[in-house]
Image: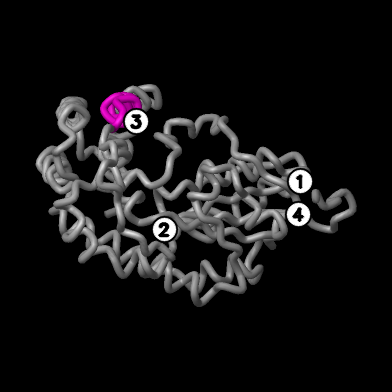
């Protein structure tokens, strides 16, 4: 099914759009790994048009695989649409939108956010250890509710919100994303995260013009991957969580196509240390490998200078 791009007048650049922690990196890297038009260049999360212009100018002989977070463009949706439809450069051959179950997204977010807190200076190494201990407690205690875990998260990190407010915020952002995709349904080809982790990219292959298989090699972005699984919410949410979370998040789930709230009565609520407490400590190691303290100092200095 692979198209012939050898005589193409322009390279088959690809835009991959999604919300944070919905598998955008792994899906974009899978598309890049399978792309027949080499060389490729992966562009990670440009937040402004001038960032894109600079990347495109520096890569005029490469195929761009550009991962864009809707979170960064939520307040500049017209500019995002102009980018996607080719009214601003580069001109994309395919535009892919990622959709993930918001219930899994909220779990993925709570487990990755400590890294963001480290980078922004809102967390210290001892905070990460306290959080890892919370996760260890949940790993041993299957009756601990997700809302209790969220409360412990908010008590650990000063930049965290009240659990209900956190869920409302994510639900609102998911609704905004669903509204945007509805308005641009002829522009984007949609891929469900759940299909991608099952190695099914058939929904986007006609738009791309080549076949895709999921990659295990995320290169220097490997730390962004946690479990690479779907429907984690079913074992994370205690039965006593469901009514509250459904009330706060149900409409947003439905807008993105997720309706089923049924969980098996005998579900195994075991969560693995590899993807939880050990993952939390791994983020701290990654932060240190990236020169974390110096990076945080520079970010704080910039915020003071340009506030």
Residue bearing the label numbered 2: 72
N-term mark: 2 or 3: 2
Residue 294 left/right relative to 130 = right
Secondary structure, mark 2, is: helix
Residue assigned mark 4: 209
Q: Is residue 211 among what the camera can see?
A: yes
In depth, the one of 6 and 190 nearer the eye is 190
Q: Is residue 224 left or right of residue 163?
A: right
Q: Position of residue 76 (x, y in %)?
A: 44, 69
Residue range highlighted in magenta: 271-284
Q: Measure the alpha-carbon separation of dots 1 and 4.
A: 20 Å
Pair 2/1: label in front: 2
Q: Position of 181 compared to 206: left or right? A: left
Q: Nearer the viewer, mark 1 or mark 4?
A: 4
Disc number at residue 275? 3
Look at the numbered disc 1 and give the secondary structure of its residue. loop
- Give me the C-alpha separation between circle 2 and circle 1: 27 Å
The CA distance from mark 3 to mark 4 is: 34 Å
């Amino acid at each position: 099914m692979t198209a012939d791009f050898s005589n193409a007048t322009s390279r088959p650049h690809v835009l991959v759009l999604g919300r944070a922690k919905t598998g955008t990196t792994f899906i974009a890297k899978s598309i890049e790994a399978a792309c027949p038009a080499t060389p490729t260049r992966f562009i990670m999360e440009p937040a402004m048009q001038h960032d894109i212009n600079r990347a495109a100018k520096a890569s005029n002989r490469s195929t761009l695989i550009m991962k864009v977070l809707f979170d960064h463009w939520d307040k500049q949706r017209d500019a995002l649409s102009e980018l996607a439809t080719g009214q601003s450069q580069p001109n994309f051959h395919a535009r892919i939108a990622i959709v993930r179950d918001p219930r899994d997204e909220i779990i993925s977010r709570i487990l990755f956010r400590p890294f963001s807190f480290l980078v922004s200076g809102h967390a210290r190494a001892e905070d990460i250890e306290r959080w890892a201990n919370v996760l260890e407690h949940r790993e041993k205690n299957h009756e601990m509710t997700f809302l209790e875990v969220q409360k412990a998260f908010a008590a650990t990190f000063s930049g965290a919100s009240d659990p209900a407010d956190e869920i409302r915020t994510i639900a609102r952002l998911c609704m905004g994303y669903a509204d945007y995709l509805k308005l641009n349904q002829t522009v984007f080809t949609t891929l469900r995260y759940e299909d991608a982790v099952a190695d099914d990219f058939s929904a986007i292959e006609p738009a791309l013009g080549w076949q895709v298989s999921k990659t295990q090699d995320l290169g220097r972005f490997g730390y962004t991957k946690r479990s690479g699984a779907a429907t984690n919410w079913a074992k994370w949410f205690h039965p006593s969580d469901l009514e509250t979370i459904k009330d706060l998040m149900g409409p947003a789930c439905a807008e993105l196509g997720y309706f089923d709230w049924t969980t098996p009565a005998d579900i195994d609520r075991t969560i693995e240390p590899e993807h939880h407490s050990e993952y939390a400590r791994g983020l701290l190691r990654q932060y240190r490998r990236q020169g974390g303290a110096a990076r945080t100092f520079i970010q704080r200095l910039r915020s003071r200078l340009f506030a």
